[in-house]
């Protein structure tokens, strides 16, 4: 009985930690996206670059999260992993475009980032 209670408690803590990590990571992603967008709107290259760094760090954290803890469908889990990889490619493309001061292409990459965010939210949240 004690082992069973301990196992349930441990599972609850792990699930809470994963959920907390996901919520914190999504908050960081939102912060990075907002900073990038503000940088575009106010022609502030530093804000764009700083937002990219925040987004890179958040995506690196999210890539390590076990999404099977809150997504039960294996196909959805794989799609989520694919979206995470796409985000990584878009972030690299955004960095490259900003470094080349090609802000037209940079905004296209930003749009792709948002499209990937929404694709994941459709799966995870049923949006």
Image (spheres, rainbow, N blue to C red):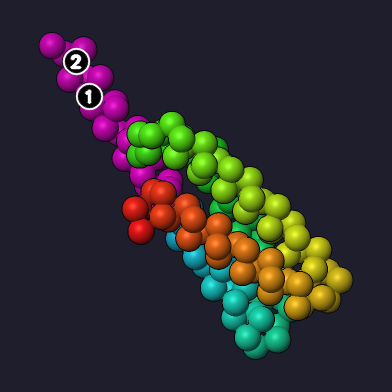
Q: Residue at x 29, y 26 (%)?
A: 10
Expressed as whole percent of the image width and height from the top left, the position of residue 28 reads 51, 60
Q: As displayed, is residue 101 above or below residue 23?
A: below
118 or 26: nearer the viewer: 118
Q: CA distance from mark 1 to mark 2?
A: 6 Å
Query: Magenta part mainly helix, strand or loop?
Result: helix
Residue corresponding to mark 1: 8
* Residue bounds of the magenta highlight: 1-24
Expressed as whole percent of the image width and height from the top left, the position of residue 100 reads 86, 71
Q: Quadrant of the C terminus?
A: bottom left
Expressed as whole percent of the image width and height from the top left, the position of residue 23 reads 40, 53
Q: Residue at x 72, y 76 (%)?
A: 46
Mark 2 and mark 1 in contact (Cβ < 8 Å)?
yes
Residue 97 shows up from this direction:
yes
Residue 18 drawn in magenta: yes
Residue 124 drawn in magenta: no
Looking at the rendered structure, which numbered label has been put on residue 4? 2
Farthest front residue in view? 75
Regarding mark 1 in the picture, which secondary structure is present there?
helix
Residue 60 shows up from this direction:
no
Expressed as whole percent of the image width and height from the top left, the position of residue 90 reads 68, 58
């Amino acid at each position: 009985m004690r082992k069973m209670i301990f196992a349930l408690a441990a599972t609850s803590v792990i699930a809470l930690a994963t959920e907390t990590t996901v919520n914190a990571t999504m908050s960081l992603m939102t912060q990075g996206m907002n900073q990038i967008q503000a940088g575009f709107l106010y022609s502030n290259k530093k804000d764009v670059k700083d937002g990219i760094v925040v987004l890179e760090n958040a995506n690196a954290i999210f890539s390590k999260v076990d999404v099977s803890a809150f997504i039960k469908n294996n196909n959805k889990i794989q799609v989520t992993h694919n979206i995470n990889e796409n985000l990584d490619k878009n972030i690299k493309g955004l960095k490259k475009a900003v470094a080349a001061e090609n802000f037209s292409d940079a905004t296209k990459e930003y749009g792709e980032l948002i499209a990937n965010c929404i694709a994941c939210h459709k799966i995870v949240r049923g949006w």
